[in-house]
Image (spheres, grey):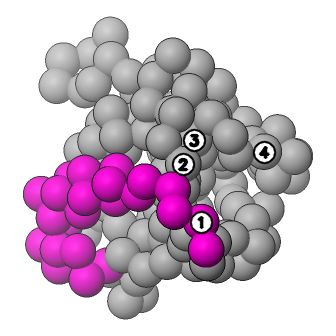
């Protein structure tokens, strides 16, 4: 373990976050997401037993969001006609507003299959045990400016 770094950030996850370059993306996927299928061209990190909000919060402590694009955060849009509870998005908004000076304006939503296409291009996919539907998040990495 390291001081000042969440214990949720395992050695493998820290390595992946460090390896990622500007513009690379990472998916934090809910328990229903086809993580192994979408991540077969990248790295799949299993974080069973954890939910998306706790992992998102830990990652945002060390991960710069892309400052050169308007929307470096993507959520999977709810399918029309599906009345699934998406209250988890409010949690994400709060976490992102706390970590990002641009606030919630950096969040966009992608239609389900467009989200899958973006996920296939991701550097890594984190598979969680999150039970909320539409709880998937894509983060685009920015630069650390000194």
In the depicted structure, whether residue 2 falls above or below residue 16: above
Q: Position of residue 96 (x, y in %)?
A: 24, 60
Mark closest to the chain's N terminus, 4 or 2 = 4
Q: Which residue is mark 2?
A: 133
Q: Residue at x 28, y 42 (%)?
A: 57
What is the magenta range? 81-106
Marks 3/2 in contact by CB < 8 Å: the verdict is: yes
Q: Which residue is mark 4?
A: 34
Q: Residue at x 68, y 55 (%)?
A: 123
Dividing the image into 4 quarters, which one contains the C terminus? bottom left
**Category of crowding for the residue at label 3, using alpha-carbon neighbours closer than 10 angstroms: few (below 14), some (14–19), many (at least 20):** many
Write down the quadrant of residue 94 in the picture.
bottom left
Q: CA distance from mark 2 to mark 1?
A: 10 Å
Left or right relative to 16: residue 70: left
Q: CA distance from mark 3 to mark 2?
A: 7 Å
Mark closest to the chain's N terminus, 1 or 4 = 4
Q: Which residue is mark 3?
A: 30
């Amino acid at each position: 373990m390291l001081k000042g770094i969440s214990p949720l950030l395992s050695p493998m996850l820290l390595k992946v976050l460090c390896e990622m370059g500007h513009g690379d993306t990472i998916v934090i996927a809910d328990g229903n997401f086809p993580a192994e299928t979408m991540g077969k061209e990248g790295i799949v990190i299993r974080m069973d037993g954890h939910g998306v909000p706790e992992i998102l919060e830990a990652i945002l402590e060390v991960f710069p969001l892309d400052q050169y694009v308007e929307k470096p955060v993507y959520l999977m849009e709810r399918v029309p006609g599906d009345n699934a509870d998406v209250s988890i998005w409010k949690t994400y908004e709060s976490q992102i507003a706390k970590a990002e000076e641009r606030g919630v304006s950096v969040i966009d939503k992608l239609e389900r299959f467009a989200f899958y296409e973006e996920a296939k291009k991701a550097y890594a996919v984190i598979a969680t045990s999150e039970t909320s539907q539409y709880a998937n998040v894509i983060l685009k990495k920015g630069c650390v400016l000194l």
